[in-house]
Every structure is written in C-alpha cells, then in structure tokens.
Amino acid sequence: MTESVKENKNTTILECINPFEKLDENTLETIFILSGNPEISTLSIKFFRVAHYIPTQVKYLKRNIYARPEFAQSVFYPGHPKLAKKEELVIELLKQEIDIDQGGKNSIYNRIFKHKMNDALYTMLRMFKLEKITYTPGSGNKIEPYIFRNNEYYIVKSLMEEKKIKKIVEEFELYKDENIETLLILLDIRIIRHDLVKGCGISEEGLFLKEKRKVYI
C-alpha cells in the first residue's frame, strides 16, 4: 500500500469518528445537563456512558426537572420509566434534600413505595429537617427545642413525620405478603433514634440540652 493510499485511509477513518467521542467527560456532562434533553446522550457511546453516571443524572434532574413546576415530573418520569425506577438515583436525590412530595404521583415518596425501593425507604426514614419554633424559657412551652443557635430555637423532625403509617399501609397495600419487607422497614420509623451530634451534624455547643443528644424523630 502506497503512502498516499495510507494517508487517505487514515483521513477517512478520522472523518468517520464521532465528534462527541473526542470531547472530555466534563464537557459532555455539561452539554447533557444544559441540553435539557436526555435523548441527546444517544449521539455517541462515550456520551451515553457519561449520561448514565448517577452524579450526572442528579445534576440533570436538579436543573431541568426539580427546578421547574411540579408538572415537569409528571411528564418526565412516565417517559423515562427506567429512571423512575432507579433506586440509586432516588437515594442521591434524597441526600440532595429534594422535596419528597413534589411531583404528585411521580414524587420520590410515591415512587419509593410503588417500586418497592426498600434501600431508599430505609434512607428516607432517617432523613430529617430542622424546624424553627417559638420558645420562651420558663413559660411552660409544650414543645422543648433540641437546638439553640444564632438566638433561634429548633426541633428536629423526620421527613415522614406527617405521614400516617396506617394510611401508607392501606394506600400501597403493604399488608400483602409480597410487600412484607417494605412494611417491616416502614415500622422501624417508631424506633429510629438520632444522635444530634454524630448523625445530624449539630455541634455540642448548639444543643439546647446537653443531655438530650439522642432523640427520636
């Protein structure tokens, strides 16, 4: 094979290489997130791989789905059932403090029970939020704060606190044999105890009562 033929062959091969394969992963991630279109990931094998990283998918969802009105989830998740059932993704969204009730039937809360995401349920039951309360020392307040910082009083509440266990069991038919594992995990909510310092990241100086470090939420 002559040199000119070899050169022409190499040029042809280079011309056939998908341009997206030449881009680095950070650039591909940025394109994927800003595009707002998950189908764009099918343009190259490398692009597809980057778009399937959990951290990349979390960034995509936070920017394009959860930042929009609630109906965005109602449109997105039915169109992408694999993502709707992806438990690792749900767990990461929980850690990002995404509202578990946002999205109606396609909310994180509903998808966890609907698709029996027991690991995600375990995580969700242990998530918490701080709620500021009005408290006057010595006035006989019914609710005593756990935390005092920046001259404000707070209690620690479970994300699931306002959910009634009986209602959840009935709504998602957790009384059925095939759902017993999910039911047992849910019932743990009554015995979950948090260490405010080790588990919730509260400094010891921020505790309202030093002896009230471990609490049920």
Image (cartoon, rainbow, N blue to C red):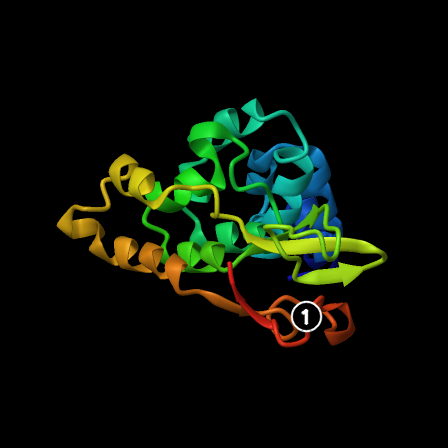
Q: Residue 203, image x and y in percent?
A: 74, 72
Horizontal relation, residue 176 to residue 86: left or right = left
Q: Residue placed at 63% from the left, 66% from the top?
A: 200
Please tell me how crowded label 1 is: few (under 14), some (14-19), or many (20+) other residues with Cα within 10 Å.
some
* Residue 88 at least partly seen: no
Examine the rendered structure and indicate whether residue 160 appears above or below residue 193: above
Examine the rendered structure and indicate whether residue 171 appears above or below residue 22: above
Q: Residue placed at 72% from the left, 57% from the top?
A: 138
Q: Residue 11, image x and y in percent?
A: 72, 51
Q: Nearer the viewer, residue 168 or 151?
A: 151
Q: Residue placed at 40% from the left, 41% from the top?
A: 111
Q: Residue 8, image x and y in percent?
A: 71, 51
Horizontal relation, residue 29 to residue 174: left or right = right
Q: Residue 85, image x and y in percent?
A: 40, 45
SS at mark 1 in the image: loop
* Residue 30 at least partly seen: yes
The amino acid at mark 1 is Leu
Q: Nearer the viewer, residue 129 or 70?
A: 129
Residue of label 1: 209
- Quarter containing the N terminus: bottom right
Q: Residue placed at 61% from the left, 73% from the top?
A: 213
| Outermost residue, front side | 139
